[in-house]
Amino acid sequence: MASTKTASSVLLIANAILYFIVIVIASWAVNHGIARSYRTASVMSMPAKIFPIYFPFGNMATGFVVIYSLIAGVVGFITSVAAFLNLTGAQWDSPNLHSAAASSLVSWLLTLLAMGVACKEISLGWTDSNLRTLEIILIILSGTQLFCTGAIHAEVENVVSRERINLGRM
């Protein structure tokens, strides 16, 4: 049990740091896009004017990558911090583990969505160096979040089986 908690805590800390980097880069991109969108998009044709934020860097998939990355980053960061706090405290029981497992799964699915759009952006062509960093971190996070989700789900199985054994003894 101690080795599972140690592995989970290392993965949760690494994920929290990586998700924070994703939040910072995606927030910078949204801020940069908002600051320059009025001037740049005012001369564009109608489909580009519909999307309220026009990104003057990257390609046509950049807006989706940035928005999905920001959503996945916020959800993943909150999930990692909450699961780490439950792990280090005395709250590593069945109800908290089930909520950590569910939120970890949702976070992984959002990260996969952002990574899939980032892969499409890579295949479309030229991107800025900050966006390449965001894409690489999303690819790394999709793997580390998978391991973290697996570790939490394995611990859920351990706790549930111990609770069943303890109930059987009563």
Image (tube, rainbow, N blue to C red):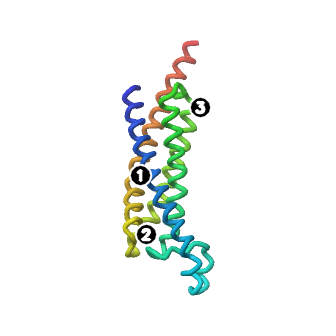
- Point out which mark residue 120 bears: 2
* Alpha carbon distance from label 3 to label 1: 26 Å
**Residue ID for mark 1:** 141
First reached walking from the N terminus: tag 3 or tag 2: 3
Mark 1 residue type: Leu
Q: Quadrant of the N terminus?
A: top left
Give how far across and how far down residue 137 sits, in percent: 39, 56
Secondary structure at numbered mark 3: helix
- Residue beneath the point at 50% across and 26% down: 161
Outermost top residue: 170
Which of labels 2 and 1 is toward the front? Answer: 1
Q: 147 or 160: which is nearer to us?
A: 147
Q: What amino acid type is highlighted by mark number 2?
A: Lys
Closer to the eye: label 3 or 1 = 1
* Front position in the image: 22 or 146: 22
Quadrant placement of the C terminus = top right
Looking at the picture, does residue 8 appear above or below residue 16?
above
